[in-house]
């Protein structure tokens, strides 16, 4: 286990609440907490049994002034998250209260923790591997039950165990290659090496391909589906946003051009996290502010995973509608024909022809009709026939996905070389590189600079 100094940070969100927690971790955690903690019984925290909680007050060392009434949990390493001695101080929630407690701890010997430093210590001390550490942040940021289940599975080590199995298979191949190199005079050794290499390598390749098959869904669960609500002004885009979010986030009027800027909201649609973007209506305008909004709309349009293209049931398709159809023809989109509560003036057959094989959903946002069908269409579009989110084969992290693609390329090169009777020591290079790349997923082969960058993205106190 590594030896570090003692760190402290607030582990609960800032703001008003019933309680807040200040966490301390390190060799001096008990001593620092004991220095400022005063129990009615006079007992020392240092002598208290592990994994117990104690009532008392925090006081200034010099003046004896009471800082806060607290409950203090003490946990002795290695049976803690960081595998170090850990103290958690439960105090009253509130910006002033919790910051006073933190400052008291810092004045008495602890250092302010860096973002993600508690989890980084858990990784460096061997409690979790890197993929599990990243899953901690995924769990915190999960916006749906399905995303949470994926994160929980990775925290439990499901992905780690599979990666470890793949690396073990490659190690067996590399060991056989070394035997072949050390004893080249024995022809039967080489005869054993190549079939074993092909068997193990093909199995590794197949498992990597299975992981990558779920990567698009997994990434959506982790990061959310960037969804743009598109359409000309006053077709009901903002009403659709409000309906999906179930809150009046966007201003709804009959005046064209009301939405001047990008409005973003997260929403859970049948377990699919959507990052909804309500855009300014794309049209030609002389209004400078609206024109800026229109330009921003064009930018986010090309970055979207899904487009909800809204047209007006009460009006025939205009030249603007036709231009928008042409703009998004190669993108993922669903056509939403809104305002079915009004008289039909649109040619639905024309809409379906222009949409080709895309879904066309009719709605009346005003009467709350058709929204369920739209949500079902969105979920089916990305998850129909997919495996359950709790399955161990889900991979959702962009870094993991990129590394798996690299590993797949290298192991494919090794297989092709083996089938082409390339000398075994040359094939060994690609097999070794595959083993190294897979090790980067779980943190066995990682540079310190990359580790620092990854953990810096964590929140303080985690």
Image (cartoon, rainbow, N blue to C red):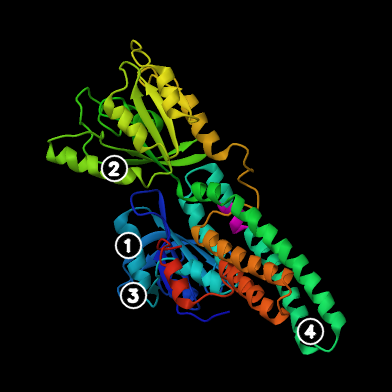
Q: Determine which quarter of the picture holds residue 164.
A: bottom right
Label 3 residue SS: helix
* Number of on-image labels: 4
Note whether residue 248 is visible.
Answer: no
Q: Nearer the viewer, mark 3 or mark 4?
A: 4
Note whether residue 441 is visible.
Answer: yes
Residue located beneath label 1 in the image: 99
Q: Nearer the viewer, residue 69 or 292?
A: 292
Report x, y in % for residue 135.
Answer: 54, 58
Residue located beneath label 3 in the image: 107
Residue located beneath label 4 in the image: 179
Q: Which residues are magenta?
A: 151-156
Label 2 residue SS: helix
Q: How far, Cα to Cα, is label 4 from label 2?
A: 60 Å
Which of the two labelled residues, at mark 1 and mark 2, occupies the earlier sequence position?
1
Tags 1 and 2 touching, CB below 8 Å = no
Q: Nearer the viewer, residue 457 or 181?
A: 181
Residue located beneath label 2 in the image: 298
Q: How far, Cα to Cα, is label 3 from label 1?
A: 12 Å
The reply to whether the magenta stretch includes residue 56 is no
* Quarter of the image that includes the N terminus: bottom right
At label 3, counting other C-alpha atoms closer than 10 Å, the crowd grade (few under 14, some 14-19, many 20 or more) is few
Q: Residue at x 32, y 62 (%)?
A: 99
Which of the two labelled residues, at mark 4 and mark 1, occupies the earlier sequence position?
1
């Amino acid at each position: 286990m590594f030896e570090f100094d003692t760190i402290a940070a607030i582990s609960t969100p800032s703001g008003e609440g019933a309680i807040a927690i200040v966490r301390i971790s390190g060799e001096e955690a008990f001593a620092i907490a004991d220095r400022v903690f005063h129990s009615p019984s006079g007992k020392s925290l240092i002598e208290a049994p592990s994994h117990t909680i104690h009532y008392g007050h925090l006081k200034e060392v010099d003046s004896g002034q009471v800082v806060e009434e607290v409950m203090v949990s003490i946990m002795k390493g290695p049976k803690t998250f960081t595998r170090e001695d850990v103290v958690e101080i439960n105090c009253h929630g509130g910006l002033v209260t919790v910051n006073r407690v933190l400052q008291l701890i810092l004045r008495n010997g602890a250092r302010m923790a860096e973002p993600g430093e508690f989890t980084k210590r858990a990784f460096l001390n061997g409690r979790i591997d890197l993929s599990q550490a990243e899953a901690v942040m995924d769990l915190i940021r999960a916006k749906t039950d399905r995303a949470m289940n994926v994160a929980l599975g990775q925290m439990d080590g499901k992905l780690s165990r599979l990666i470890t199995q793949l690396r073990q298979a490659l190690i067996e191949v590399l060991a056989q290659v070394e035997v072949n190199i050390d004893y080249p005079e024995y022809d039967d050794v080489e005869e054993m090496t190549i079939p074993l290499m092909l068997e193990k390598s093909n199995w590794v390749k197949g498992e990597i391909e299975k992981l990558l098959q779920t990567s698009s869904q997994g990434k959506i669960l982790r990061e959310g589906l960037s969804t743009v609500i598109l359409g000309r002004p006053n077709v009901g885009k903002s009403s659709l946003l409000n309906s999906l979010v179930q809150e009046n986030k966007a201003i709804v009027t009959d005046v064209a051009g009301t939405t001047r800027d990008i409005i973003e909201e997260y929403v859970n649609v049948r377990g699919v996290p959507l990052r909804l973007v309500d855009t300014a209506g794309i049209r030609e305008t002389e209004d400078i502010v609206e024109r800026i909004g229109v330009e921003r709309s064009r930018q986010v349009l090309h970055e979207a995973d899904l487009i909800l293209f809204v047209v007006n049931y009460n009006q025939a398709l205009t030249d603007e509608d036709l231009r928008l159809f042409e703009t998004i023809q190669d993108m993922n989109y669903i056509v939403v024909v809104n305002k079915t509560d009004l008289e039909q003036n649109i040619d639905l057959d024309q809409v379906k022809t222009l949409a080709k094989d895309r879904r066309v959903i009719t709605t009346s946002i005003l009467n709350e009709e058709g929204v369920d069908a739209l949500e079902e269409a969105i979920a089916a579009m990305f998850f129909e026939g997919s495996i359950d989110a709790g399955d161990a084969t889900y991979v959702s992290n962009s870094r993991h996905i990129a590394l798996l693609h690299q590993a797949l390329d290298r192991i494919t090169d090794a297989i092709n070389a083996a089938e082409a009777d390339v000398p075994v020591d040359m094939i060994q290079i690609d097999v070794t590189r595959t083993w190294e790349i897979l090790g980067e997923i779980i943190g066995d082969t990682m540079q310190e600079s990359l580790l620092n960058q990854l953990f810096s993205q964590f929140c303080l106190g985690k």
